Amino acid sequence: MRIIPVITAVLVSGFLYLLVFERDRLVAFAQGSPAASEETTTEMTEADAATPDTATGVGVVAIHSVAQTIDSAVILRGRTEASRQVTVAAETSGLVISEPLRKGAYVNQGDTLCRLDPGTREASLAEARARLAEAVERVPEARAGVTEADARLREAEINLNAARQLSQDGFASETRLVSAQAAMDAATAGRQRANSAVASAEAGIEAAEAAVAAAEREIERLEITAPFSGLLETDTAELGTLMQPGALCATIIQLDEIKLVGFVPELDVNKVTMGAIAGARLTGNKEVQGRVTFVSRSADELTRTFRVEVTVPNDDFAISDGQTAEIIVAAEGRAAHLIPQSTLTLDDDGVLGVRTVDADNTARFMPVTLLRDTVDGVWVTDLPDAVDIITIGQEFVVDGVRVAPTFREAKG
């Protein structure tokens, strides 16, 4: 009598198993649906693909992948930077006597930014010029003294020669010879003094000219001008401000050409070359294009990155200094494969790669380098030009395991 409850329990358990775990097959069987049967068969086939078969190998799904040449690019995050920026400062002291220019104004090269009170500088210049004229007048007088000294020296030389001749013949005393020699020495000394007077007069001219130049330069410093054309980043000094050497007059930036500055990792620095075409996307989705004009050869000590500058036109000043920019620098094209991201796997050492099918239908791990991630898949390199890549079942095989691949069409 106890056998009936046991049979009943077995039947109920079997029914519950079919209802819970084999519901789809049960419904398909009850409805007689061919589509459901095909789906069930497909699921069984995919499940069987991962089941080892000692006769044919492990069932996997693979694709025939052929390398394509893609444009390689280096992507950087950076900012915009004015092509030139300078703080114009005073070189002398004085009160500002010019009306201030307001920030944002455009100034041309040579325009006056700040003008200082000349004070007594004009009088100092006039005095220096008068001293120069006086020094110039002394030169002819000093040169006339040289001519006179030359004549006296010649006369003393003739008298000395005559006294020596007469002394040898006994017609002149020794005293006359000594007197002639003394006159000769005095004439020589006079000649030297005359030459010194000329040199002193010429030195006086040079000193006077230097004083005039210094006075003129001091007056020139009273007018502070723009070193290049650009926009005022600050107001110029206010009227009545007392300026000292080094005091700020204004800050000017040049934006008609602007730089995009980014920092490239040391692994990619060799991909960036001078003159390479580069583009950037700024805030507001504004896109600009230019060329690489500078690549640093010295890495930053902290980040180990290299500074890259791209110069782009900005004639309308639409781009400001300090905007965030996503910079793309074109590089030489590379051969790469477009594969599903799920295909990527790691070996026992943690190296990124894919599992491939060799000519003898055995699995083989091949390391790859990830170039770019897209919505259609990932671009990888370091693979042969043509290769069979396992897309389903790669986690169930290792190097040397025989596989039974089923191929499907790869995405182009």
Image (spheres, rainbow, N blue to C red):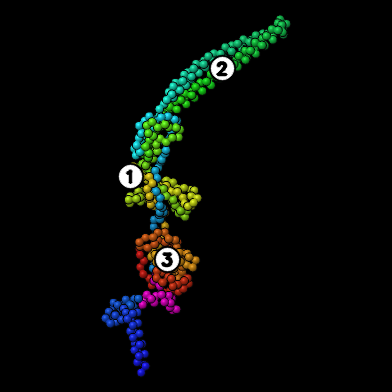
Neighbours of disc 3 within 10 Å: few (<14), some (14-19), many (20+): many
Q: Position of residue 178 (x, y in %)?
A: 69, 10
Asked where in the image residue 340 lies, by quadrant, the reply is bottom left
Q: Secondary structure at mark 2?
A: helix
Q: Which residue is mark 3?
A: 344
Q: What span is in magenta?
A: 44-62
Residue at the image point whose x is 34% and y is 37% from the top: 102
User: Can residue 359 be seen at all in this image of the molecule?
Assistant: no
Between discs 1 and 2, the one toward the N terminus: 2
- Nearer-the-camera pick, 214 or 241: 241
Distance of label 3 from label 2 (alpha carbons) = 95 Å
Residue type at mark 1 is Ala
Between discs 3 and 2, the one toward the N terminus: 2
Q: Residue 318 — which label?
A: 1
Seen in the picture, residue 266 relative to 114 is either above or below; the reply is: below
* Farthest bottom residue in view: 1
Residue at the image point whose x is 51% and y is 21% from the top: 205
Residue at the image point whose x is 50% and y is 16% from the top: 137
